[in-house]
Amino acid sequence: MVLMENEFSKNYVILKPENANLLDLFLFLLPFGLRKKKFIDCPYGKEDYFTNFADRWLIFVSMLLQFILALIATPLAKLDAFLLKLFNFISFNGGLLGILSKILRGKGFVKIKEDSSEYTSVVGFADWRRDLDSSIKSEKSFRYYSALTVMATKISYESKPFVQSVVNDRWKMKLLGYFNFWNDFQGKATTQAFTFENTAIDPNVVIVAFRGTSPLDAYDWQVDVDLSWYEIEGVGRIHSGFMKALGLQKATGWPKELPKTQTHEFAYYTLRKQLRDIAKANEKARFIFTGHSLGGALATLFVTVLSLHDESTILEKLDSVYTYGQPRVGDQQFAKFMVNCVQKYGFKYHRYVYSYDLVPRVPSDAVLFKYKHFGRCVYFNSLYKGRIVKEQPNRNYFSLLWVIPKYLSAWWELIRSFIIPFVKGFDYYESLLMKGARLVGLLIPGLSAHFPLNYVNVTRSGKLNVPDEVEDPFLGYEIEDDF
């Protein structure tokens, strides 16, 4: 028997921009226009999903953004490759002064080695820091693990030699695994993660770090702006792109086990096996999941599927989840499922949001799609002053009420990039590449605010105001006031 794609879910809305053109989209917006065509896949009889104009408008915007990203995907990839070669060439040859010295002395240039621990990504050149902040005490605290996990999410964009060098040599910890996972729907390995043991202060703690959205990868951004979802029975509606990245199977969804004939490594199943083995070998083992951007969504969804499969051996040892600039993952039912999971297994969930970062404000929480965050938000403004809130200000990126504040904040961040090293010290110096991102942020406010550098800064120098009590119908844990 041949299983059809999407058969694992009885309810879903899948957008297929590759099957549409601009005329189709404009006709779809009209009250008497198309309601369902080849560019939207949903179960038979569910076409009434699209009778509401607000729903059609959101679909139109999502599809249009995906069109634009598809058009610029190749130029962005070429720009990414060019910047990688350029900045690594400069770095391998001792900087601009080193290159000038070699030219004056007639010496040859050092060749770029992609398998070198010094080969760095665009994210790495935007924020050159690799060491942990020595001013933060190495102890089992919220602040320490915030500072450690955010650095882990930052280096998750790097190659295995880079990650291995930083974790083992600089942090004095132990890299357990570095992975490139298969995406069954894209037909290639596009999900990265690594695991390491905190041998520096507690070898029982194992951290799983998922890589996020690459700044110049249009396909990663397409996943973020796509509104498609699948409904998983007993869990809720979940963003399809995030599930696909974690290891969703085309025909069977989330089977408890994969067939032995499966040759590819999928994020969920491979990481679950590693954590199962660690949990069985060490009764005192404790796990922490983390990720920035898309990686934060994957860290959250990893918990979801573990709970769906009743993986109590792992979940009972889960200490906490730290996410940075995480997009919304599912709907209200999903949020309640996750809250119940947090309360059942007693782990802590810390969702960091910096200022007007655009990614935590997508996908939309309106009408048909109703994507929702859950739990408390650790929110920091552009002055690095933090507070615990139910939801970050300006819930939706496209809200007209927040246009002026977003642009003012973007201008302030550009100005701050020049003055912050004089105020905070050289550790906060922003590279020319990061300053360039700040300039782009003047056109697309919230874009440069999404860079990991901002989250590293708030965990190092941010001041977090923790109230005695925060009303929250969903979550019942407190955060230590140690910032």
Image (cartoon, grey):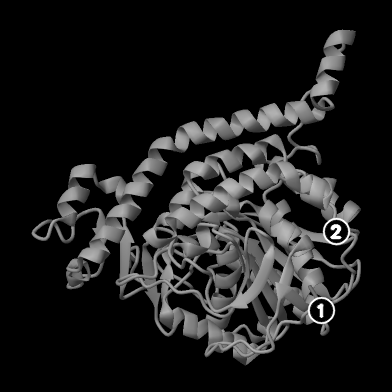
Near-viewer residue (389 or 36): 389
Rendered location of residue 231, percent (x, y): 37, 75
Task: Tell me the residue that label 2 is attached to.
Answer: 133
Foreground mark, 1 or 2? 2
Rendered location of residue 1, percent (x, y): 33, 68
Near-viewer residue (258 or 345): 345
- The residue drawn where x is 78% and y is 79% is 286
Q: Secondary structure at mark 2?
A: loop
**CA separation in Å, label 1 and label 2:** 32 Å
Q: Amino acid at mark 2?
A: Asp
Q: Earlier in the sequence, mark 1 or mark 2?
A: 2
Task: Tell me the residue that label 1 is attached to.
Answer: 281
Residue 186 seen: no
Can you say whether 181 is above or below 276 in the image?
above
- The residue drawn where x is 90% and y is 9% is 105
Can you say whether 363 is above or below 84 in the image?
below
Q: Secondary structure at mark 1?
A: helix
Q: Is residue 203 left or right of residue 404?
A: right
Please identify the quarter of the rendering in which residue 380 is found.
bottom right
**Circle 1 Cα neighbour tier, 10 Å, few/some/many (<14 / 14–19 / ≥20):** few
Can you say whether 410 is above or below 351 in the image?
above
Q: Determine contact: label 1, label 2, CB under 8 Å.
A: no
